[in-house]
Image: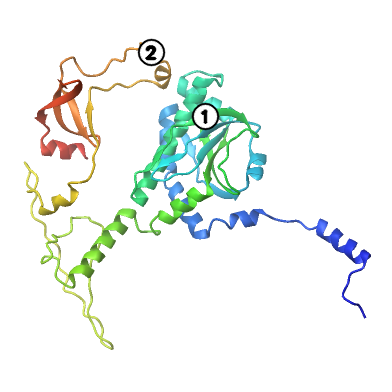
Amino acid sequence: MSDGSLSQDEIDALLQETDNLEIDTGGGLEGLLGEKERGQFLRLLEGLVGAQASNLSILTRKSVNLDKPTLQVVSGEDLSASLPAELVDVKIDFSEGLRGEHSYLLDLGTAQAIAGLMMGQAGVEMDDAALSAVAEALSQMSGPVASEIGNQISRTVKTAPPDFQRASRDQARFPQGEAIVKVEYPILVEGQAPSRLTELYSLALVKEIAGSLPAAGQPAAAAGLAASFAQGARAQGAAPAAARGLGAPPSGAGMTFGQSFGSAGNPAVPPNVQPVQFANLQGGGLPAESGNIGLLMDVFMELTVELGRTRKLIREILGIGEGTIIELDKLAGEPVDILVNHKLIAKGEVVVIDENFGVRVTEIVSPMQRMGDLT
């Protein structure tokens, strides 16, 4: 009968079996991002593919096809092994509203082709000017992502200026941590060979974004509005909407409110539903100011005074240096535009107050014209 101890031959056999085991760490890393988080984040990115491709198409003046992304959670070692030998690494971290590491990787040939199209030159050298052009293209692609994330989570989300380099696969910069979220987009630029664009996120950033997104099928604005109505209903009881000062919902508001009444064992009685009737719209002015406007008085808005504008090609912008004169579309002495959140509201003339510039309002844009600018 054995005393429970192992002989040397048995120990050697067990060690040999252990050496032959294959340990799969990939599944463990994939498990760090839940299925719900993965699905929400992928739905967000899939909805932005069209806007990203459009921005890149405008910059290159070529048709750009960006296919739906795939997502993996990988280690830095596995990621490095999957990259091309030479690439362009553009780091565009999230810096406001959300904070986390984020970057793009593009193989050198595709980056060179994009830079050549933007600069209007075939076979460009990947110098600082060409790298800057590629960084600008990828920055324009990340813009819709940051904006939509901000819209979805009701925050102002901004990214840092792009930090770019030409690198080998061993020199590429990855987000810190044991796991990296790797998103790949098949990309096809007209006249170029098919390629792949790699986007990297820190795992913590993706989890924070996914955890802040509204549930599938419920837009962020609708979720917030529904919560506000629910809170108001709890505070005011079953008083009718008219008694609480709530007007009829606007046409096409996209939300339906209803109520059914009944008791145990009795079917609920359906309400008497009638078509909604709206008053005729009258031109010439906006309704009188609502008493609830006071709720918005402390909201910050961006007011900008614009001297003028112009449009230039990427190659012209890259050629700007000290002493360059940029001609604007405004005539000397013409009123400057005053904009709030990039919408024209007034015109004025530049004045000097002590040692600072100011602007004296000379004309208020009519309400009807302002409403027309929104369409």
Considering only order in the chain, which callout, 2 or 1, is on the residue closer to the N terminus? Answer: 1
Where does the image place residue 110, in percent across and percent down from the top left? Answer: 56, 30
Residue denoted by label 2: 322
Q: Secondary structure at mark 1?
A: strand
Q: What residue lies at 14% left-to-right and 50% top-to-bottom?
A: 293
Where does the image place residue 353, in percent across and percent down from the top left? Answer: 15, 22
Q: What residue lies at 41% left-to-right and 22% top-to-bottom?
A: 314
Q: What residue lies at 56% left-to-right and 33% top-to-bottom?
A: 106
The quadrant of the rendering that contains the N terminus is bottom right
In this rendering, would 123 be left or right of 225?
right
- Identify the amino acid type marked 2: Glu
- Identify the amino acid type marked 1: Phe
Q: CA distance from mark 1 to mark 2?
A: 23 Å
Q: Against 294, is 309 above or below?
A: above
Label 1 close to label 2 by CB (< 8 Å)? no
Front-lying residue, 65 or 260: 260
In this rendering, would 273 be left or right of 32?
left
Q: Which mark is residue 164?
A: 1
The quadrant of the rendering that contains the C terminus is top left
Q: What residue lies at 39% left-to-right and 47% top-to-bottom?
A: 149
Instruction: For residue 235, say whether it is visible.
Output: yes
